[in-house]
């Protein structure tokens, strides 16, 4: 790779020889800690993934980290589809990762915490049942660290540098949406999203890039930047040392190093994996019982820390309006491990034509991933014109910078999304409704600000004062929205 | 704004075509988190504001954030003058702001905290008195969040992203000195100081820039960088959505969006604002009683957090010398909200010819604003020559980088200042007097260090050992300083 | 220094005129907070110091901070050799410093904490004994802040901006290895390592640079960047002001300012320094008693904070294997002041041919300094080839980026090192042995991952399952390693 230039060098060259490009490249919201990006924010765009990597066990699609929007927010987004009975090689990242499970499939998740004991143990005679309908198989003696069932609506935490894996033990595909915060303080490497695997041969994956996507035509010279870098960490270790410290045969070392493995980073376990775990029935009982294992945030030790919180269940919504929809958040208050990740998330559902009132995040960027439906979305920054004004549809991603106002109106088919936020305690300020900033201001001030009567100022303050953040459409707007 | 280049691009270009400029541009102390600025520190300068924006309700003067000194320290300074009965449009910033009220005027301040209740309530019959001598006016029913009276010597905290406003209800102009810490971790946007208003038409303001000010001649190409960006956040939101979520008439939406408003971002309330608040008499009683509402930092909830601390009263000085002057600091110990802002401040008064002994800040930059008088100031860094050696007068600003030594000798008219510091617990090490580092060193070491007798080393350690930080001038120096 | 360009400017120039250089310059692991360094990591190298500064009292050797490896990790390394009866001028840095005392010499250390009392006090009549064999000398009345004896294996903390000094009161040279973390959040200046002295004339030091060292030939234009900047902080202060605030004679001011001093920044105290301190005998008794003054981290006040922890004693090893060696760490758990420095350290000893199993740091960079012997070291990153594969010998330094795997096999003479880590609680994940990630994974998953039998997967998990991190060489490897 002697032809690599640093991004900075490239950029200097680009400025000199492609000033036109540099002039377009202003659409870049950003965390200031990314010094190399001045991130002029004039235009956002809805993003689709631009790369696909296929492997035996599934598919990953990557939203380029060096798309300027994502780069300036300091994040990478990945959608992973795991086939039945497949799992991804255990590995770790150079940044914290928050994973959302959209309504599809189920599986298990495990984070390896260094120094913690193997608390899931079985003896030789244990009889496990994998699935109703399958034949009972004997689980032989094994012990490993805790594993967690996951299902739709779960948010799963993966701290920086911790080995973790996902396994699809369900009947259909398991889809995962990953947000990797390469801008985190816990990442002391560069902004590149780096993935280190404990096995396999990631370079063997077939890549299907769509490198001309988006407005960044003419950036072929940065093509190699567009890969996220991954490697089998055993790959470069000397064979003899590895053979010695693992205490295994030479052939096994070859296997561990993934030589000749062409399956990619997700692989299939033909018979399914035999795991030590409570039976599916036990798990389901707990779930229907519905009690949630809220920690108090203090009693938890790192070895038993909760890594998962479900935000998909409308019965536990934080904001609910039967005409408009519901919202549920996960943050450091209900999932304390997020203090380490410095990330949080919001799950929202808007019914047909309903409106999420204008609001902004005080202290975080928002990365919206649309799980279903579509909406008209507006984002307003420091300019007279919105920096985004258009449709946002299933599978698309939009970055909303900190402090920029956001409003959404669901389309005919409703609108469902998950938003990742780059702070463990992201705070919202609403610009309309019961929790609106207007409510906090004196009536007389509103009248004077807007040069309106005191009566009209009271209207402004109280007319929609019963609704919180999400609004049912009035008959007028219903009429307007219908064709 | 298609002609915008990113700062980085510009810089690269500047280096190529204006190497002379780049060579001069070395006078840049800085926080390292600002990667794009290597901030070679060779020469500081006393700064006056370079931009004025006038509006109906007053005037703001801005110290350019992209002046290299301020940019490298990661701060913007703003002096705001609010006319009688005027207020600024409620709004929020992308960074924490600490405000000092120099000895002029009085007013009220409010921070809107999302989710907190409207705790200032009145019923229809309430009779309020605004001012002695004015006629009593009926305050009609209203409720809003807490408002705080402010007066000279107050330091007021405005956390990132929180809507806040100031209102001048006094008899004369209200002057405010704002320090905005765009380098704060809570700002995930770029370093640009961005102001988001809930109303008005900020772009209508008449700007009176003095763009050729300072040593940065020939930087016209960065002119557009020199504006701080502000906008009415409702401006870009779709009219119909806004009408619906606010539940008001179309005309009111127009007013909220500030169309055609030419008053700027500060406006006058001809009759004065009717606010729900304790009477001025009640407030004054409390003040003369003199008890201060020190929180313990734990009992406080965010909704009742103290946002204000007075550091103007010599009766509460931290350091006092009747011959030399006094110093009072506000930090996270006496104003816990500063833990969120990561800022602190120092108010100082030096009498005629008195000296603030050489000292440095261990962990913060210092931004000095002179409120009265003048002094001879020296700042010493890593070079043989001082990086600053000259007069500093009323209305001027000087940035003193972390670890750089600072000394001040007041002129004939004394010297008063406020210093903002970029840490919630800024620590000082004094190089002379009772708290001097010399006192902590063995006499024998001093003798050996400076190749002086043990007796002279004891003199060094103890001769001025009764004085703390501020020194009355000796007769010699008095003689010297007098004309 | 009008010919200074900022590093960034230089870099842009370098890219344009020395693209070949830029292409080589990719070997740069880095903390992202250093925006200007994209730090492509392809090749690491073992580093020797490239600069020597001699002074009367000893010698310092500096590992260039702008070597790309060190720059990207945000650290500077300094080896200081202090002669008998010599000390360095008290001074402070713009960044936290962690010091290790390799097996050579002994001395004392003191950190001046502003506002803390002088707690080491003597009265006139006190009789001190410096060393057995020397004649008793009278210590005259003195008082100063706490001083701490240091000896081999000590790790000593020096917080940002705090004045501190070292004094060699032993019989032989005292060697100190300093790690300065210029990338720390507590450094708000630029990345340059800056040293501020309270005396002397640092610029008088004879510099013996070896500027052509390493792969960065052709970088003469950055030569001036390669100095670390130091100054006598009193140098630039006006003579009259200094005379007044110190209350001493004009001649003493000259001495304090170091005019004409050619001794450099370390000086000799011909008669030895007379310090107020417990006798050497009292200190030794405590040591052989062996009790360690572990604080609970809460009771400590800043004035009595422990600044020192010994990690040289095998009797207190954290990991011990009589066939392989031992490891001892110091972090915020056993030295709470490290919470302020955000640094930790590891001391390791590998016996002949023993292996430190492959492992990586989850959350920190590692800077290895070899104190004795040599080893074969491999570092594996995101590439097929190791980024380092070679010998590492006494006196050399290697930077291992966060998340990169590291393995060491000691040579014939064994291998001893100290590793500095850029987090107060650096966490290791081992890839082999009892604490290996393999142990945490299900056997069935290992079989499926590596396409091996369940039996072989169990071998992988348990064969070397009794050993923790460090492995004695098997007879095979012994045979291999022997000539």
Image: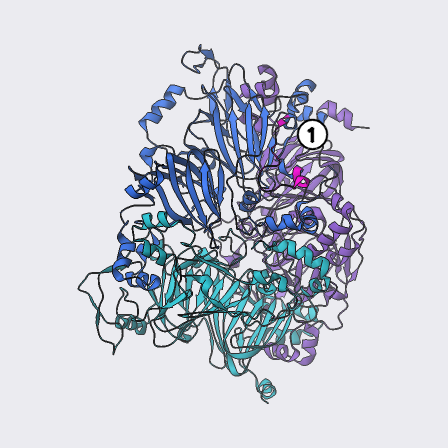
Chain colours: A blue, B cyan, C purple
The magenta stretch spans residue A222:
yes
Query: Which chain letter matches label 1?
Result: A
The image quarter in which residue B259 lies = bottom left
Mark 1 residue element: loop
The magenta stretch spans which residues?
A205-223
Q: In this view of the protein, which residue sits in the foreground, C452 or A99? A: A99
Please state, as top left, top right, bottom left or bottom right, where the C terminus of chain B lies in the image.
bottom right
Q: Is residue C5 something that shows in the picture?
A: yes
Q: Position of residue C30 (x, y in %)?
A: 64, 45
Q: Position of residue A472 (x, y in %)?
A: 30, 41
Q: Position of residue A241 (x, y in %)?
A: 70, 27
Q: In this view of the protein, which residue sits in the foreground, B341 or A69? A: A69
Please state, as top left, top right, bottom left or bottom right, where the N terminus of chain B lies in the image.
bottom right
Q: How many marks?
A: 1
Q: Residue at x 32, y 56 (%)?
A: B251
The image quarter in which residue A104 lies = top left
Mark 1 = which residue? A237
Q: Position of residue A144 (x, y in %)?
A: 51, 24
The magenta stretch spans residue C356:
no
Assess disc 1: are there few (<14), some (14-19) or many (≥20) residues with their C-alpha within 10 Å of its C-alpha.
many
Q: Main secondary structure of the magenta part?
A: loop
């Amino acid at each position: 790779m002697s032809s690599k230039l640093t991004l900075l060098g490239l950029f200097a060259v680009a400025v000199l020889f492609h000033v036109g490009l540099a002039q377009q490249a202003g659409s870049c919201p950003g965390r200031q800690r990314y010094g190399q990006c001045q991130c002029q924010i004039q235009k956002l765009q809805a993003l689709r993934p631009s790369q696909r990597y296929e492997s035996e066990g599934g598919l990953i699609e990557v939203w380029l980290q060096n798309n300027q929007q994502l780069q300036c927010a300091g994040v990478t987004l990945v959608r992973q589809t795991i086939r039945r009975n497949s799992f991804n090689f255990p590995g770790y990242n150079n940044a914290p990762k928050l994973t959302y499970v959209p309504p599809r499939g189920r599986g298990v998740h495990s984070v390896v915490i260094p120094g913690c004991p193997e608390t899931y143990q079985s003896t030789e005679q244990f009889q496990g049942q994998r699935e109703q309908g399958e034949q009972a198989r004997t689980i032989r003696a094994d012990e490993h660290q805790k594993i967690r069932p996951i299902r739709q609506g779960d948010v799963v935490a993966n701290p920086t540098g911790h080995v973790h894996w996902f396994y699809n033990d369900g009947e259909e595909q398991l889809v995962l949406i990953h947000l990797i915060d390469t801008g985190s303080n816990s990442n002391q490497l560069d902004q590149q999203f780096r993935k280190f695997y404990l096995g396999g041969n990631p370079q063997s994956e077939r890549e299907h890039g769509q490198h001309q996507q988006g407005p960044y035509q003419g950036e072929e010279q940065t093509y190699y930047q567009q890969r996220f870098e991954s490697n089998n960490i055993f790959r470069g270790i000397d064979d003899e040392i590895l053979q010695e410290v693992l205490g295994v045969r030479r052939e096994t070392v070859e296997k561990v190093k993934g030589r000749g493995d062409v399956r990619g980073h997700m692989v299939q376990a033909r018979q399914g994996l035999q795991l030590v775990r409570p039976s599916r029935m036990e798990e389901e009982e707990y779930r229907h019982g519905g009690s949630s294992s809220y920690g108090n945030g203090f009693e938890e030790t790192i070895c038993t820390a909760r890594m998962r919180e479900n935000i998909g269940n409308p019965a536990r919504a934080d904001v609910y309006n039967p005409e408009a929809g519901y919202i549920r958040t996960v943050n450091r208050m209900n999932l304390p491990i997020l203090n380490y990740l410095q990330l949080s998330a919001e799950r929202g559902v808007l019914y047909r034509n309903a409106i999420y009132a204008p609001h902004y995040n005080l202290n975080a960027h928002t990365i919206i991933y649309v799980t279903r439906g579509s909406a008209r979305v507006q984002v307003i920054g420091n300019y007279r014109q919105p920096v985004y004004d258009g449709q946002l549809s299933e599978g698309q991603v939009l970055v909303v910078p900190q402090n920029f106002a956001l409003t959404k109106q669901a389309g005919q088919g409703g609108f469902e999304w998950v938003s990742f936020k780059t702070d463990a305690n992201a705070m919202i300020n609403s610009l309309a409704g019961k929790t609106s900033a207007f409510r906090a201001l004196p009536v007389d001030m509103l009248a004077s600000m807007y040069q309106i009567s005191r009566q009209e100022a009271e209207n402004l303050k109280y007319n929609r004062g019963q609704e919180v953040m999400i609004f049912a459409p009035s008959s007028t707007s219903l009429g307007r929205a219908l064709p």
